[in-house]
Image (cartoon, rainbow, N blue to C red):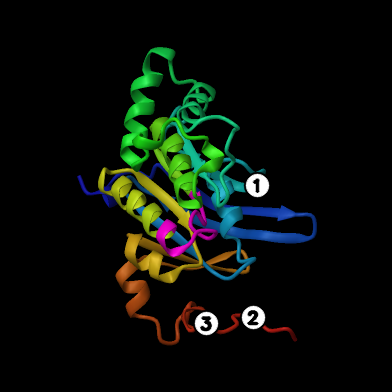
């Protein structure tokens, strides 16, 4: 069955988030379907991170957030992952323990996760001694190990050098090829073009455009995202 014909894994309907006097998200509607790789783009302050946290169920909100399977596991990877003062192996084992993975499964899952992200040879190295790209791959291994139905990523390559970005992109592309559903925010439009199946453009807390990737990058001319794609301001100081 085509994924678009299936009910969404997650649906927001007229969802709003306010922080004091700031309207961070305003009546957002969004469906997340199986096997999609959705990338959120927009200027700083447009609401990308807030939307990710709302999708992940971390924020109080108005409107509806409906999950198809309330028991399904979700995971989130942040721009700067926290590393315990432990080895790569034990960082992963602790994460699986905290996620409630049964003890009998942890060793096999940890081995598979390190192999999946290319860190099997570094299992005994202190996690904090890894490069930035390697630390982010370890964060991805921790997420992969809990077998999430949806993986959320908040600008996971923003702090990395080009080599680190390439490493992480390769892992994410492999996750997507395996059928994982991913939702990621980024400022890197080239990355969005390479990885996304669908691009969502936010401006001032509202979704202004939601299109398949090829259409998003080929059809702009005078559309809502045109100024953003040209690198121009989408708001005025006046």
Instruction: Determine if residue 91 is in view.
Output: yes
Q: Mark 2 — residue?
A: 235
Q: Is residue 30 left or right of residue 18?
A: left
User: In x, y percent, where is residue 162?
Assistant: 43, 64
Q: Quadrant of the C terminus?
A: bottom right
The answer to whether 196 is drawn above or below residue 204 in the figure is above
Q: Mark 3 — residue?
A: 231
Sooner in the amino-acid sequence: mark 2 or mark 1:
1
Q: Residue at x 52, y 35 (%)?
A: 126
Q: Tag 2's secondary structure? A: loop
Dividing the picture into quarters, in which one does residue 7 lie? top left
Number of residues whose C-alpha sits closer than 10 Å to that of mark 3, classed few (under 14), some (14–19) or many (20 or more)? few
* Nearer to the camera, 208 or 187: 187
Calculate the distance from the C-alpha at mark 2 to the C-alpha at mark 3: 12 Å
User: In x, y percent, where is residue 75?
Assistant: 48, 38
The region drawn magenta spans 153-164
The answer to whether 38 is drawn above or below residue 84 in the figure is below
Q: Residue at x 36, y 46 (%)?
A: 181
Dividing the picture into quarters, in which one does residue 25 lie? bottom right
* Nearer to the camera, 135 or 131: 131
Q: Residue at x 32, y 79 (%)?
A: 218
Calculate the distance from the C-alpha at mark 2 to the C-alpha at mark 1: 25 Å
Q: Residue furthest top?
A: 104
User: In x, y percent, where is residue 165?
Assistant: 42, 59
Number of residues whose C-alpha sits closer than 10 Å to that of mark 2, classed few (under 14), some (14–19) or many (20 or more)? few
2 and 3 marks in contact (CB < 8 Å)? no
Q: Mark 1 — residue?
A: 61
Number of residues whose C-alpha sits closer than 10 Å to that of mark 1, classed few (under 14), some (14–19) or many (20 or more)? some
Instruction: Determine if residue 11 is in view.
Output: no
């Amino acid at each position: 069955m085509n994924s678009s014909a299936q009910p969404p894994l997650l649906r927001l309907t007229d969802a709003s988030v306010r922080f004091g006097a700031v309207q961070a998200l305003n009546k957002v509607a969004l469906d997340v379907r199986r096997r999609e790789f959705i990338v959120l783009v927009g200027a700083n302050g447009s609401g990308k991170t807030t939307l990710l946290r709302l999708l992940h169920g971390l924020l109080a909100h108005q409107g509806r957030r409906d999950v198809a399977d309330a028991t399904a596991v979700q995971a989130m990877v942040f721009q700067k992952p926290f590393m315990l003062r432990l080895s790569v192996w034990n960082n992963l084992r602790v994460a699986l323990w905290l996620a409630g993975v049964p003890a009998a499964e942890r060793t096999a899952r940890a081995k598979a996760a390190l192999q999946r992200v290319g860190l099997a040879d570094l299992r005994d190295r202190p996690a904090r001694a890894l490069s930035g790209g390697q630390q982010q791959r370890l964060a991805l291994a921790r997420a992969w190990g809990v077998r999430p139905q949806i993986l959320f990523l908040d600008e996971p390559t923003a702090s990395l050098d080009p080599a680190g970005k390439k490493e992480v992109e390769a892992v994410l592309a492999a996750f997507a090829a395996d059928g994982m559903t991913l939702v990621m925010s980024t400022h890197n439009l080239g990355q969005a073009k390479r990885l996304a199946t669908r691009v969502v453009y936010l401006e001032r807390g509202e979704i202004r455009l939601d299109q398949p990737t090829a259409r998003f990058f080929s059809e702009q001319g005078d559309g809502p995202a045109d100024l953003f794609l040209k690198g121009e301001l989408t708001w005025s100081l006046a």
